[in-house]
Image (tube, grey):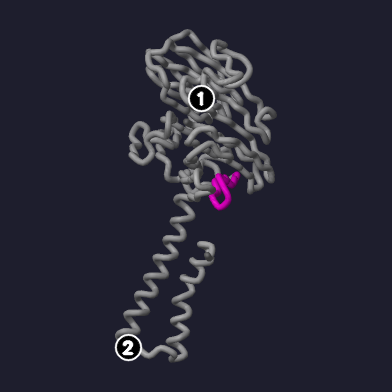
Amino acid sequence: MLPRSSLFLLISLLPVYISLAFYFNLIALPPSAQDTLLSLLKLANSNLRRAQLSSRQLSSSVITDSNMTVKIIPRPSQERGHADHDWLKTFHTFSFASYQDNNHSQFGSLRVINEDRVAPRTGFGTHSHREFEIFSYVVAGQLEHKDSMGNIEILKRGDLQLTSAGTGISHSEKAYGPKQVHFLQIWSLPSVSRLQPKYFTRHFTDAQKRDVWARIVAPVDAEGVLKDSREGEGPAPVQSPLTLYATLLSDGKSLKQTIKGSKGYIHVVQTSGYNTNVATGAAIRVIGAPGVEVELKEGDGAYLHFSKSGELTVENIGDKTAEVLLFDLE
């Protein structure tokens, strides 16, 4: 059987063959029939090109064996929810605040990925949460955190702060100092309700993330997790079936990671600057199986579907270091 790409090529060339036949008078039809046929051929060719483009951009799926299906569905940066409040410039991967999209409301236990830029000495005033696991991943600048549990902390690049809101907490998050703070605010749904609120911080240097997958968040019962330590080594403990990895992937490098859950999500951090248009900057290729791959740039993400545990490969195909977050979700 011909590969699908070859089949597309042969079909797309049909209008050329028929046009040549008309030109050399190899086909004799009344003028009205010729005009109708030519119009239909142009329409068919246009639809074929559109179908090819849609197939490449929107999803990729393949059966790798009789028991395994892999699918990657891109989430382009410019299609995320977006708001510019002057003091806050934010992107929403999932429905949040005034941005509501039933196609992007939640994925597994993952409920929020907001990529926020907060102007100096401004931020989110005191507000309350309950029944969410809330973590902040600081990309640049400094973030001041205060909460009703008495925690006061200045977070910087490499810091990860996790609040298990449980029965309820109040907190504020503001840019500290003279520079903007760029951070990702991530929420997940806990597996158990009415938990006692807790607070955790972890720090991961650039060196710890350079060309490796650093496990920065993991379920409370996972190996190597210090679930009762406010600070410490290893991943922050989360009350959700979610593992989060981070890497700073150098140009030309690639990494593999086994996805143990049936779902995953990958996000390329927008490190080159604020951009509301089509993604630019660092570029990666995400490969779920032979023939199942997408290319992503800063701000882009992708939904990952596995019918059973599978291996994901991420390659840096650009000329800049890519900061990438990878979620393994049950």
Residue 144 visible from this viewpoint: no
Whether residue 139 sits left or right of residue 192 in the image: it is right
Mark 1 residue type: Ser
* Most foreground residue, 272 or 48: 48
Task: Indicate whether 278 appears above or below 255.
Answer: below
Q: In this view, does 249 lie above or below 148?
A: below
Question: Alpha-carbon neighbours of circle 1 within 10 Å: few (<14), some, or many (≥20)?
Answer: many
Residue placed most toward the observer, 248 or 177: 248
Point out the stretch of residues depicted in magenta: 282-296
Mark 2 is surrounded, within 10 Å at the Cα level, by few (under 14), some (14 to 19) or many (20 or more) other residues, namely: few
**Is residue 84 rendered to the left or right of residue 287?**
left
Front residue of this view, candidates 323 and 286:
286
Q: With respect to residue 230, does 209 lie above or below?
A: below
Real-space Cα distance between discs 2 and 1?
68 Å
The quarter holding residue 97 reads top left
**Residue found at the far left of this picture:** 32
Q: Residue at x 49, y 55 (%)?
A: 56
Instruction: Verify whether residue 288 appears in magenta.
Output: yes
Lateral position of residue 257 relative to residue 126, left or right? right
Residue type at numbered disc 2:
Pro
Earlier along the polypeptide chain: callout 2 or callout 1? 2
Q: Is residue 242 in view from this perspective?
A: yes
Q: Which residue is drawn at 63% across and 24% down?
A: 204
Q: Which mark is residue 31?
A: 2
Does residue 63 sit above or below 270 in this rendering? below
Asked if the magenta segment contains residue 273, the reply would be no
Q: Name the residue under label 1.
A: 136
Secondary structure under badge 2?
helix
Q: Position of residue 72 (x, y in %)?
A: 49, 45
